Image (cartoon, grey):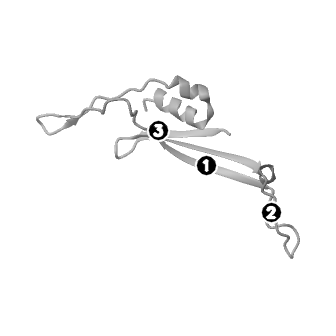
Amino acid sequence: MDFEFEGSALDPFGNQRVGLSGKVDVNRKDFGLVWNAALETGGVLVSENVTLTFEVSAIKQADAEAPAESVVESTESEVVAEPVVAEPDVEASEKGGLVGWVKNLFATSNR
């Protein structure tokens, strides 16, 4: 299934977030869903073909082993934090699939 990258941004809580969307048509009988009901006017109640539409919002999860980001307050009451640049997760991208693709996207994105 192909996904389109819809964009990347920081949410109001400072988390990196990406948007993805995708659509795929499947035959429900391929998954063992064969139930149906005949209609009085002819035809059947449920189509064999089903369109699955996905709108995904993924949030980058903090690395559990990494130390927490330090926040330093200046004398002018401003909060200053150093940006964190993540290295690509090669192992996840080699696994493939949506999860590996999103992890790789976060790791290489500085948007």
In the image: residue 34, left or right of residue 69: right
Q: How many marks?
A: 3
User: For this rendering, which residue is in front, 93 or 41?
Assistant: 93
x and y percent of residue 97 in the render? 62, 34
Mark 1 and mark 3 lie on one chain; the one further toward the N terminus is 3
Describe the element under mark 2 as helix, strand or loop: loop
x and y percent of residue 50 in the render? 74, 54
x and y percent of residue 109 in the render? 46, 30
In the image: residue 59, left or right of residue 13: right
**Residue at 77% across, 50% down:** 31
**Rendered image quadrant of residue 59:** top left
Q: Amino acid at mark 3?
A: Ser
**Residue at 87% across, 67% down:** 43
- Marking on residue 35: 2
Q: Alpha-carbon neighbours of circle 2 within 10 Å: few (<14), some, or many (≥20)?
A: few
From the image, tell me which residue sits under label 3: 8
Q: Alpha-carbon neighbours of circle 1 within 10 Å: few (<14), some, or many (≥20)?
A: few
**Residue at 60% across, 39% down:** 4
> Mark 2 or mark 1, which is nearer to you?
2
The relative height of residue 24 versus residue 95 in the rendered view (above or below) is below
User: For this rendering, which residue is in front, 89 or 51?
Assistant: 89
The relative height of residue 93 versus residue 79 in the rendered view (above or below) is above
Q: Amino acid at mark 2?
A: Trp
x and y percent of residue 18 in the render? 49, 40
From the image, tell me which residue sits under label 1: 54
In the image: residue 39, left or right of residue 9: right
